[in-house]
Image (spheres, helix red, strand yellow):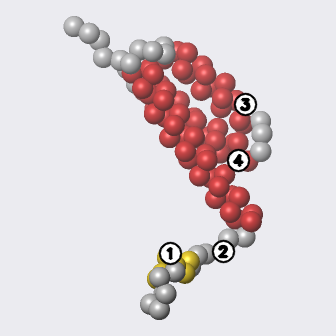
């Protein structure tokens, strides 16, 4: 939040200070969510447009999930988000051309 001082055009910044551990957790969570959204969009577009076969995309996601499950809790959360991408992709069926 930024406030303007009535007597001076300078800005006064009012913010919330986070403990470094909390900031690191928030930073990690934000990266996991951004990565999840990027993977969801990218795999969906690639498969939908026929650029990447669905079977290959599923294999890549399964490998990424397996690799992340063996690491720290942040990576395990990423694996869970990638599993959601895999579920969404698995339900997708390209329409047949007539």
Write the residue at 74% across / 65% down.
Answer: 20
Which residue matches tag 2? 17
Graded by Cα atoms within 10 Å as few (under 14), some (14 to 19) or many (20 or more), the crowding at tag 1 reads few
Q: Residues within 10 Å of mark 4 (few under 14, many from 20)?
A: some
Please tell me which of labels 2 and 4 falls first in the chain: 2
The residue drawn where x is 73% and y is 47% is: 73
Of badges 1 and 4, the one in the foreground is 1
Label 4: element kind? helix
* Residue at which label 4 appears: 74
Q: List the residue tagged with mark 3.
A: 67
Q: Are marks 1 and 3 in contact (CB under 8 Å)?
A: no
> In front here: 41 or 74?
41
Local secondary structure at mark 1: loop
- Give whichever of discs 3 and 2 has the lower sequence position: 2
Asked if residue 58 is positioned above or below residue 77 in the image, the reply reads above
Q: How far is mark 2 from mark 4, CA to CA?
A: 23 Å
**x and y, in percent, of residue 31 in the image:** 61, 47
* Horizontal side, residue 5 vs residue 77: left or right: left
Cα–Cα span, label 1 and label 3: 40 Å
């Amino acid at each position: 939040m930024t406030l303007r001082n009535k007597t001076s055009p300078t800005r006064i910044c009012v913010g919330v200070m986070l403990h470094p551990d909390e900031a690191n957790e928030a930073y990690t969570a934000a990266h996991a969510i951004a990565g999840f959204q990027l993977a969801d969009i990218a795999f969906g577009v690639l498969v939908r447009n026929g650029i990447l076969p669905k079977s290959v995309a599923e294999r890549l996601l399964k490998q990424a999930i397996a690799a992340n499950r063996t690491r720290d809790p942040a990576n395990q959360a990423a694996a869970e988000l990638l599993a959601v991408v895999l579920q969404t992709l698995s339900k997708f069926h390209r329409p047949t051309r007539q």
